[in-house]
Image (cartoon, rainbow, N blue to C red):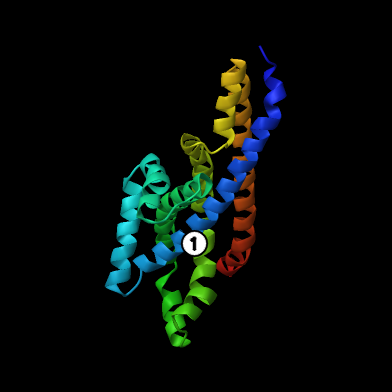
Amino acid sequence: MNDPSSYLGLILQGALVTVELTFLGCFLALCMAFLGGLARLSNYLLLRTLATIYIEFFRGTSIFVQLFWAYFVLPLIGFPLSPFFAGVVALGLNVGAYGAEVVRGGILSVPREQHEACVALNFNTWQKLWHVILPQAIPVMLPTFGNNAIELLKGTAVVSLISIADMTFQAQVVRSQTGNTAFPFLTILLLYFLISLVISRSVRALENRMSRGMDVSRVQ
């Protein structure tokens, strides 16, 4: 039987793919979260309807189905995607649907007086959002965004089903070649934990930095 530890490099290569999937998936999810969340609060019925359809569809269907749909169905209608980018699209759109509700809730948490002050200052919609609403709403959103990012990280394991060589896929390769299950899956268990810890600490540091000024204003 081969020494499982000699396959550590293979698993670390998979870890790099997992990190890339997580980063790009989170970027897409963040974009979709703000687009969907702001559209849900729009005064235009069409935008609200489209946002609601997107959110309810991706929250109400399985990530497995969404992944297979992105990889196998989109090419049939003229949108071929590589396995990697099919994974990014499925993960990003899925988590973005949950994030859209976080954005909506964060914006609604800003006191009404702040909106009225923007009207008094004659701010247009974008000035109000950029200078007043979002600086107060984003610190409220960040803890849940962090949780969503960690969920996306764990969700990357499904991409092994379309032969993307992420950590889970490589662990399966090591298990099949060595007959050892404990080493590869204990290794990726620790790697998932370490990556999620980095995400958690980073989001917490960002939250503390962004909410520092708000804490001072509340004391005043």
Q: Is residue 54 left or right of residue 216?
A: left
Q: Secondary structure at mark 1?
A: helix
Q: Nearer the viewer, residue 151 or 170?
A: 170
Asked if 88 appears above or below 116 in the picture, the reply is above
Residue at position x 39%, y 42% in the image: 68
Q: Nearer the viewer, residue 107 or 58?
A: 58
Residue at position x 49%, y 39% in the image: 159
* Displayed quadrant of residue 63: top left
Q: Is residue 137 left or right of residue 219?
A: left
Q: Is residue 107 visible?
A: yes
Q: Nearer the viewer, residue 126 or 219?
A: 126
Asked if 14 appears above or below 107 in the picture, the reply is above
Quadrant containing the C terminus in the rendered view: bottom right
Q: Nearer the viewer, residue 68 or 23?
A: 68
Percent x, y of residue 196: 59, 41
Q: Amino acid at mark 1?
A: Cys
Provide the residue designation for mark 1. Answer: 31
Residue at position x 59%, y 57% in the image: 207
Percent x, y of residue 112: 40, 73
